[in-house]
Amino acid sequence: MGIEVSGVSGLILLVLNVWAIIKVVQSSAGTGNKVLWIVLILLLPIAGLILWYFLGPR
């Protein structure tokens, strides 16, 4: 039912998600916004990463 990502593409996605979460934590956004972005990235790995890239805190 869900999207299965494995192998090299799964590893790349994992690294990008960890990088995005680190960037969210280091941002100057409020705590609530940080938590929201981290949850979004964790629950929707591909879509959350794309949304964070275009709409996330800088």
Image (cartoon, rainbow, N blue to C red):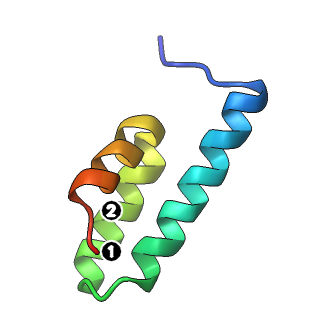
Q: Quadrant of residue 47?
A: top left
In the displayed structure, 27 sits above or below 14; it is below
Which one is nearer the viewer's eye here, 1 or 33?
A: 33
Task: Point out the residue furthest to the right here.
Answer: 7
Q: Quadrant of residue 24?
A: bottom left
Helix, strand or loop status at disc 1: helix
In the drawing, does residue 51 fall left or right of residue 18?
left
Which one is nearer the viewer's eye here, 33 or 22?
A: 22
Helix, strand or loop status at disc 2: helix
Q: Position of residue 54 (x, y in %)?
A: 25, 52
- Going 48% across and 62% down the picture, which residue do you hit? 20
Residue 37 is labelled as 2
Distance of label 1 from label 2 (alpha carbons): 5 Å
In the displayed structure, 40 sits above or below 34; it is above
Disc 1: CA contacts within 10 A as few (<14), some (14-19) or many (>=20):
many
- Going 67% across and 41% down the picture, which residue do you hit? 12
In the drawing, does residue 28 fall left or right of residue 25?
left
Contact between labelled residues 2 and 1, with CB atoms less than 8 Å apart: yes
Q: Position of residue 38 (x, y in %)?
A: 41, 63
In the displayed structure, 53 sits above or below 5; it is below
In the displayed structure, 42 sits above or below 37; it is above
- Going 48% across and 18% down the picture, which residue do you hit? 2
- Going 63% across and 24% down the picture, which residue do you hit? 5
Disc 2: CA contacts within 10 A as few (<14), some (14-19) or many (>=20):
many
In the drawing, does residue 40 fall left or right of residue 21?
left
Residue 22 is labelled as none
Label 1 sits on residue: 34
Q: Position of residue 15 (x, y in %)?
A: 66, 52
What amino acid type should be assigned to the residue bearing mark 2?
Trp
